[in-house]
Image (spheres, rainbow, N blue to C red):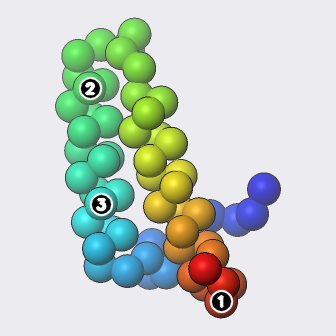
């Protein structure tokens, strides 16, 4: 698996989306340990993949 991009590698929009998704994960986490956050994690992973592709020069 490719290395995760550094926070400085994200665009402002990507940073905002990751921050919002992280806040949603934290909010769900307060509901209990049994709450599923895998859908939000996948969204963050897609944003990371998008940043990786952009940094590699491809779309």
User: Do the numbered discs 1 and 2 sit on residues whose CB atoms are within 8 Å?
Assistant: no
Which is closer to the viewer, label 3 or label 2? 3
Q: Nearer the viewer, residue 5 or 56?
A: 56
Q: Residue at x 24, y 39 (%)?
A: 24
Q: Are marks 3 and 1 in contact (CB under 8 Å)?
A: no
Residue position for label 2 = 28
Q: Quadrant of residue 32?
A: top left
Q: CA distance from mark 3 to mark 2?
A: 17 Å
What quarter of the picture does the C terminus occupy?
Answer: bottom right
Residue lying at 65% horizontally and 89% vertically, measured from the top left:
57
Residue pictured at 29% horizontal, 74% vertical: 13
Q: Which mark is residue 57?
A: 1
**Dot 2 surroundings within 10 Å: few (below 14), some, or many (20 or more)?**
some
Q: Secondary structure at mark 1?
A: loop
Q: Is residue 20 left or right of residue 57?
A: left
- Residue 45 drawn above or below residue 16: above
In this image, 11 relative to 5: left or right?
A: left
Front of the two marks 1 and 2: 1
Q: Is residue 25 visible?
A: yes
For disc 3, the marked residue is 17
Q: How many marks?
A: 3
State the image coordinates of residue 6 (x, y, percent, origin top left). 53, 73
Counting residues from the start of the chain, the first of labels 3 and 1 encountered is: 3
């Amino acid at each position: 698996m490719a290395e995760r991009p550094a926070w400085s590698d994200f665009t402002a929009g990507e940073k905002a989306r990751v921050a919002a998704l992280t806040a949603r994960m934290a909010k769900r986490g307060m509901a209990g340990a049994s709450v599923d956050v895998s859908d939000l994690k996948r969204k963050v992973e897609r944003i990371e993949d998008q940043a990786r592709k952009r940094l590699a020069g491809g779309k």
